[in-house]
Amino acid sequence: MLNKFRDPELCGKVLERLRAELSGGLRFMEVCGTHTVAIFQSGLRSLLPDEIVHLSGPGCPVCVTHESEVNAFLDLAGRDKVIMATFGDLMRVPGHQGRNLKKAQADGARVKVVYSPFDTIKLARENPGDLVVFIGVGFETTAPTIAATMMMAREQGVENLRVLCFHKTVPAALDVLLADEKAGIEAFILPGHVSAIIGLEPYKFIAEKYGRSAVITGFEPLDILQSLLQMVEWRNAGEAHVVNNYTRIVSDGGNAKAREIMYTVFAPSDALWRGIGLIPGSGLEIRPEWEQFDAMKEFGIVIKEVPPLPGCKCGDILKGIKRPDECPLFKKACTPANPVGPCMVSTEGSCAAYYKYKLD
Ligand code: SF4
């Protein structure tokens, strides 16, 4: 079935229509790191007309993890009787003075890479004399699984598991990006995975408040081209709509069960985003009823503004104000082997994608 969405002939036809309809260009942002990679990997990036400006948004979980949050987990790593558990992509994210989890591990900190949050339950059981601290980053896609892990840990009487809750939620960030006219975003390709949880409703403000279009989109070339064509046609007609084109995976109502699990354990909170700053209502915090798992409370961690990494333009890139090649460190001081900022570390980061696909 997916072959249809990769068919070069069909894609060519949509591309032709897109070229014919395009007048005055289109400045669009894809919000999801997986779309960033899909657009580069499929070759779409070089096939799209020059007048289409492609911006990568704040949808890479590692990239938006705030400097203060990175410093907080680096400070915990290496503490006596603490085992840090994390997804692999956080291992090389730099904090201040070039520190990262990989270096902390080399210096003797106990850091374990896990493939699923549920692995932390086994880790906690195997190390009853230690506290296992899981670094919870990511959006509405990952938060329900971490909430379910905490529920399972409680059911099983596991008392030595904690979670550093740095989760973020997408819609409020899009509101902030649209309110900042510097980026001039005209249209959004909306994330497939996050939308599978939250559905269509939370994005409606994009058309109602800002008169911009946005489409929940799959990750195949035809998915992306069709959504772009639709948004160009609407703009030409003076219309703005928010629709779901990824109906083979996403239902308009999202996944109510996953949301119920997520909001049983977490409550909406304000959150600091790298490069964007404090966004009210854009994060999740552990509810008081679940505070036995709350590493922030356990260690008295306060997340606050700190100066950005010197020279790194990740913040402007995440807001759509700059492209990676406009950062003076890109491909010079900053490469995937020696990343200065998180946008070069994560495989979903736009600097890493620009580097890998040799676009500059
Ligand atoms: Fe930051 Fe490196 Fe990207 Fe520049 S190239 S914005 S230093 S990650």
Image (tube, rainbow, N blue to C red):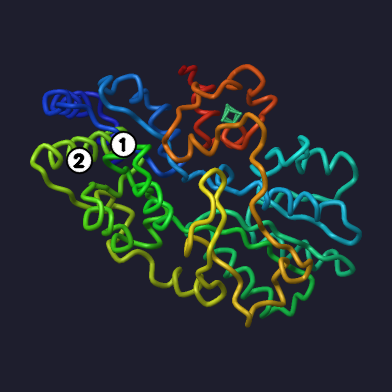
- Report how far apart the C-alphas of labels 1 and 2 lie in the structure: 9 Å
For label 2, count other residues whose C-alpha is less than 10 Å away and answer few (under 14), some (14-19) or many (20+): many
Amino acid identity at mark 2: Met
Left or right side of 128 for 291: left
Q: Residue at x 70, y 70 (%)?
A: 294
Q: Which mark is residue 323?
A: none
> Looking at the rendering, which quadrant does residue 79 occupy?
bottom right
Q: Quadrant of the N terminus?
A: top left
Q: Residue at x 59, y 45 (%)?
A: 62
User: In x, y percent, where is residue 124?
Assistant: 78, 66
Q: Residue at x 66, y 36 (%)?
A: 309
Q: Say if disc 1 is inside 8 Å of ligand 1.
A: no
Q: Residue at x 23, y 36 (%)?
A: 228
User: In x, y percent, where is residue 315?
Assistant: 53, 39
Q: Residue furthest bottom?
A: 289
Q: Secondary structure at mark 1?
A: strand
Q: Nearer the viewer, residue 234 or 97?
A: 97
Q: Which mark is residue 231?
A: 2
Q: Is residue 226 above or below residue 272?
A: above
Closer to the chain start, of discs 1 and 2, is 1
Q: Say if disc 2 is inside 8 Å of ligand 1.
A: no
Question: Ligand 1 lies in which image quarter?
Answer: top right
Check if mark 1's residue and mark 2's residue have beta carbons within 8 Å.
yes
Q: Secondary structure at mark 2?
A: helix
User: In x, y percent, where is residue 253?
Assistant: 30, 66
Q: Nearer the viewer, residue 53 or 280?
A: 280
Amino acid identity at mark 1: Phe
User: In x, y percent, where is residue 201?
Assistant: 29, 63
Q: Identify the residue under disc 1.
A: 28
For label 1, count other residues whose C-alpha is less than 10 Å away and answer few (under 14), some (14-19) or many (20+): many
> Looking at the rendering, which quadrant does residue 4 occupy?
top left
